[in-house]
Amino acid sequence: MEIDRTVVRQDKPLLAALGGAAIWPPPVWLMRQAGRYLPEYRAIRAGAADFIALCTSPDLAAEVTLQPIRRFGFDAAILFSDILMLPWALGHGLAFREGEGPVLPPLRDAAGLARLDPSRLTGAITPILETVRRARAGLAAEGFDRTALIGFAGAPFTVACYMIEGGGSKDFAATRTLAYADPALFGALIDLLTEATIAYLAAQVAAGAEAVMLFDSWAGVLAPDLFRAHVVAPLRRIVATLKTRFPAVPVIGFPRMAGMMLGVCARDTGVDGLGVDTAADLAVAAALVPARVALQGNLDPLALAVGGPALARGVETVLRAGRGRPFVFNLGHGVVPHTPPEHVAELVRRVRAAG
């Protein structure tokens, strides 16, 4: 059956909040809600050849997407994948090494840029789109009628960071150096990634994603002028293009560590929701961000891992700051692997009991 993407599903709390409704208690989901803290995830992961194989196995990836919904009843499921599956789909090398994280060949020159092949994208993401379809069907089949499905991608700047550095970094100095030293090359890479991200997210929506999120994990390392050029401008372009095709599908931006630039990002990009990281004061963010934009965040994942009074205080602080405006309860970063699942259940109970 054809899915109508011109109508906002007000019966799904996440979509209603992203559409501007100040729902209380707020909808709740968590970044990295599907992952190593869950024993059922670890069992699936142990049977997969490697992490890329898991991300490109629709049966397994859809099962992992649904696991936290069955256990906790979150208001959103998020596609199980990785932000670096996009450069992988463009033909860039990618491996995930135990204890080291992602490893990629550093892209530092025009030859490296020329090796990226956008024509590969459609074929390469086919299994990921099948995961979207199966996850959406699974939510319906298992009776999670009020749970929305979120698709996602890494924002162009953060994806570029990993490609240029060849993996993670403390300060992404090579990336920032390239942006200053060769703005034409850096801009061309951002442009290519922006167009690929638009195609990738549009395909996820066509496959059944009801909202999409852009993770700009390293946005905060940039000076304000580069932030405007390589975080705000690409996000504005992505949002505008997606909205022409899917006007009712909300877009959440997450410019992590953006600080005072949160307001710029909210005002100048057209996002429907804005993720707030752990270090930000949610009350201050609420003053910076227009009331039409839903805030999402921002409990410290370590407060969740510790539980007890730290969790109780943290949940109360976040709820107090988010009340009275469109708001989605989440973490300020992803669930950490040593988090006890019962702490997550307690978080959900506290949010749902908010008076």
Image: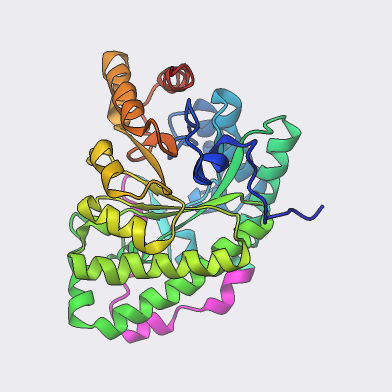
Q: Residue 179 lies in what quarter of the image?
A: bottom left
Q: Can you say whether 104 is above or below 305 in the image?
A: below
Q: Residue at the top extreme?
A: 308
Residue 174 visible, this orientation:
no
Q: Can you say whether 90 is above or below 318 in the image?
A: below
> Is 310 placed left or right of 84 in the picture?
left
Q: Can you say whether 305 is above or below 279 in the image?
A: above
The question of residue 12 being in magenta is answered with no
Identify which residue is drawn at 29% across, 72% down.
229
Chosen colour scheme: rainbow
Locate the C terminus by quadrant: top left
Asked whether 124 or 295 is in front, the reply is: 295
Find residue 38 and report its horizontal and vertical position in percent. Answer: 48, 28
Total marks in image: 0
Find residue 334 and report its horizontal and vertical position in percent. Answer: 37, 39
Find residue 106 and report its horizontal and vertical position in percent. Answer: 31, 71
Identify which residue is drawn at 36% across, 70% down.
233
Residue 234 visible, this orientation:
yes
Identify which residue is drawn at 27% across, 49% down.
288
Q: Residue 307 lies in what quarter of the image?
A: top left
Find residue 312 and report its horizontal and vertical position in percent. Answer: 32, 17
Q: Which residues, given as a range, are shown in magenta?
A: 99-122
> Is 204 placed left or right of 319 in the picture?
right
Q: Can you say whether 180 is above or below 110 in the image?
A: above
Asked whether 23 or 52 is in front, the reply is: 23
Identify which residue is drawn at 64% across, 33% down.
146
Q: Residue at the right extreme?
A: 1
Asked whether 272 or 216 is in front, the reply is: 272
The question of residue 100 being in magenta is answered with yes
